[in-house]
Every structure is written in structure tokens, then in C-alpha cells.
Amino acid sequence: MSSLTLEKPPAPASSPAPASFPAGASRPATAKATSLLIGLDLGTNKSCILAGPPASTDITVSKVIPSVVGYVKDGIVDGIITGNARILYGEDALRQRLHVELVAPLAEGVIARPEAARDFMQHVRQLADPTGRAEIRAVVGVPANAGEPAREGIRRSAQGIFSRILLIPEPFLAALGFRDDARVKQPGYVDPVVNSLFIDIGAGTSDLCLVQGYFPTREDQISIPFAGDAIDGIIHEELNRTYPNNGLSRLSVREIKEANAYVGPSRKPLDVKVVIGGKGRTLELGDAIGNACNKMIEKTYPALTALIEAASSDSVVTLLQNIIVTGGGSQIRGIDTVLQKKLAEDGYESPKVRLAGQDFQRYVALGALKAARAARENQWQVLLE
Amino acid sequence: MRRICRRVWLLRSEGRGGEAQRVEETELAAAAAQVREISESGPEADARLKALWAEEGERVAAAMALAEILAPMLSDRLGAMAPVRVPAPVPERPEAATPGEARGIADFIDEMLAQDRAGSR
């Protein structure tokens, strides 16, 4: 150790102070009590926000909210909207859909409406830090292979709202979030960060990613612009063809899909109760839903096999045991078994496809919060106001 | 002396703590001993060294902050001005990790940032 006894200046240290520094030496600004870290999964339909202090494992805020901003229409009389708010967010906006213009800040996983995105980010900040006084740093998930314009869109939306930001591809964050840190060193635990293949099916994009103990390269990630929203579109079209003038909105179609989605052989008859023109009706949607969801298999399977074949021969056998489906698409009934069966039929060695489980909506944000807590000072990107 | 202090801070800011410690224990310690030797008053020399250390720390912090702001701006402008863009060399696929190899999340982020830099060059 050095014989010098020097005080640590306020910056730029990211590493712990050397032992030669006095214990009471000033600490960098990031360690102040008012610092807050956010892990944010900014999804096309739903966003997940997890927040907590640095240097801790506590999660103080955990929310999943619809990614939607509602701008109150002109002429709405006082008292209709709680607090006469001009902008509503998430569930509140959806509840008041009659009185607001609903704007989705994202489309296909990237920011499509910058103003709404900024308002939404402001809401995220408010949820994480109601006092408005904390210095906030956020790790935000981006679709695999998101280009610079998509990343710049997020940075611009976060300017003046978060002080620093770090953008990390979503499937890798999902692997980090899915990893059970308490069991990583236990014998027999298969660490998803060491060797796995993640299929993250969201609303805007389906992202596939090889995670093999290093940060995935561009070649290890495939993003497909076909996901939940595209399935909704196909079902809606089929509904309009089979049941003209049904009057069902895209939102209603999404709800129908979320309750009944499946892949594999037809589950006809699949009767769904809806209200059309104020009257209850039962529609048979077995083929409409099945055909639309099976498109997801058609789109993702070639990408899945391409990534498997790109893995090294040393790792591929274990990799085939660790194919994990997450995101909203993991709720499509049978998606794991259909993918696994297809792989087995195509001769892949004992493939095992499993679902991420109940927390599928939170893994990306959880991984983002873990990354925020582990990030070094010089890895954060400064956002200018 | 200044140069050595700056190097230590720079290495630390790059997350190269081990190297920083080595320079601190060898070159910095030797230079500090020399300063003390030629100085008339020990406490005065220590105070000067402390001030110099702090000053260089702040300079490195300011430089890093400036670089973080300037790098994307310059990259955008130079990219727009360049008549032909030379494609960046594609980073080789790293070796898959062997079981038990301890790698921190910050190391993954470093790899990601290196890939981003290579991609935007």
C-alpha cells in the first residue's frame, strides 16, 4: 500500500477508496442518501418500473403500468377527471378513455411519439420518487439490436428527468433478472447468464438472444418486428371478416387474445363472450386466434434455430436445455411445448424450452435494476438538461 | 507528480483498480517520497501533495464528463461530414464462459460499451 495519506477528492472515483484514505473522507455525489436507481422496461403496451437505493438490494417501488398517456379532451367539465388533471397515465388514462386522447408513446418497441414519451418518463419519475428531489439514474431496456435513432429517442425523452442513463438490450436484462443470485454458486444451478437462449416476446418486437457468459454481440441477438400487437392485428382483421360491424376496438381484441391465446393444433370450438352494440354475443374464435398465434411460431422458429446453430459445439448441448420464453408472449398457451416439439422433430439434441414464469413482466426491469446497482461511475451516460 | 496522480485517477475511472493501485504503490509512493525529501517542512509537503491529488482528481472528473458529452456530438458530426464511412471491424465473438468463471455485471456492461463504440466508429 502507498505510504501516502491523501484525502479522496469528490470525483471521479468509481472504485472504492483505497485503504490509505481516511474513513471519513468525502464520498462521491452518487452515494448521497437522495440517490435513487430505476430499472425500467419501457414496453410498447406495458412498462415495468422497479426502483431502489444504490448499495442495497431493497426494491422500494415495483409497478407494471400500461404504456399509455391520456390527454384530456377540450371541453370536459370540471370534476369529471379527478383533480381536473390535464394528463392521465396508465390505468387511469384507460379508465377515462372516453374523455382523453390516448397516445401510446412507443410502437414496435421504439419511441414513436416523443412528447408523450417525455410525459410518460416524467410519470415514471414521479412514481419512483414522489418527493421529486432524488437524483435518479435509470437503466432502460432497449430491443435487441436497437439502432442509434431508437436509443437517441429514449435519451431525449429522459433528458432533464433522469440525471444519468444506461441503455441495455432487453433479452440480456431478462437473463440477468431471471438469474437467481442466491443460487448462482450452488452446485447444480444452471446460471442463465452463463449459457441460455432467451426468447422475449413483447408487444412490438420479439427478441431472441444467446447469453453465454459474455455480453451478446450483434450476431447473438435477433429482433423480429412481429409480436403481440401484430397478432392482435391479424385477429382483428379476421374478426371483421367473419363478423362484420362487430364494433370491437383493438383494445378489446387484445383482451380477448390475452385470455385465449394458444399455439399448436386448432382448439376449435373456442367460444368467446363479447358485448356488441350493448348485446351479449358468443363468437367462435378458435381458428382466428390459433392461426394468428401460430404465426408467432413461424416467425420465431427460424431465428431460434439460427442462434442455436451459431453457438459453439462445446456449449450447444447445455444451451438446448436452457431455452427460456419470457415477456407477454410467454403467456400464449403451448408456446413452450410447440417450440420444443419442433426442435426435437428437427433433430436437435434433447431440447428443453421452458417459460420464465409468473414474474415474466418484471424480469427485464429486475435485470435493469441489478445492472444499475452494478454499473461503474464511468459507464453511465450523462443527460444534459 | 501531477502526471502520476492523473494516471492513477484515470485508471480508476476506467475501472482498472488493480493497475491504479500498482502505480500508486510504486511510482506515486516514490515520487511522494522525493517531494518530501526535498521539501523543508513535512506537513507543508503533505498538504501540497493532498492538494495536488485532489486537483488532479477533479481534472480527470471534469475531463471524463466533457468526454461523455463531446464524444457522441463529435461522432455524429464527423459521421455526417465523412464522405465515406469505413465500416468498423466486427468484434470477434468472445469465448463462451466456463462454469465457475466469475464475471461481474459491470464487466458485461464494459463489453457492451466497447461493442457500441466499435459499432459507431
Image: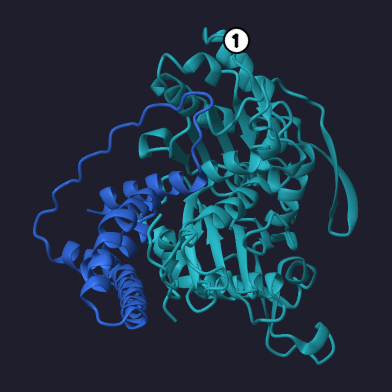
Chain colours: A cyan, B blue
Q: Which residue is situated farthest in the left direction here?
A: B83
**Could you say which quadrant of the image residue A2 lies in?**
bottom left
> Where in the figure is residue A121, as x and y percent of width and height?
59, 71
> Where in the figure is residue A189, as x and y percent of width and height?
66, 25
| Residue A19, placed above or below residue A319 | below
Can the viewer see residue B1?
no
Give amino acid for label 1.
Ser
At horizontal 56% and vertical 15% (from top left) the residue drawn is A343
At horizontal 71% and vertical 81% (from top left) the residue drawn is A131
Q: How many marks are shown on the rendered structure?
A: 1
| Residue A55, placed above or below residue A97 | above
Residue nearest the observer in this picture, A133 or A225: A133
> Where in the figure is residue A187, as x and y percent of width and height?
66, 22
| Residue A307, placed above or below residue A172 | above
Residue nearest the observer in this picture, A67 or A176: A176
* Image quarter (top left, top right, bottom left or bottom right) of the C terminus of chain A: bottom left
Crowd class of label 1 (few under 14; some 14 to 19; many from 20; radius 10 Å): some
Judging from the image, mark 1 belongs to the subunit labelled A
Q: Secondary structure at mark 1?
A: loop
Horizontal side of A103 relative to A20 (left or right) equals right
Can the viewer see residue A100?
yes
Horizontal side of B79 relative to B93 (left or right) equals left
* Image quarter (top left, top right, bottom left or bottom right) of the N terminus of chain A: bottom left
> Where in the figure is residue A106, as x and y percent of width and height?
54, 61
Q: Mark 1 — residue? A: A350
Residue nearest the observer in this picture, A360 or B72: B72
Horizontal side of A193 relative to B37 (left or right) equals right
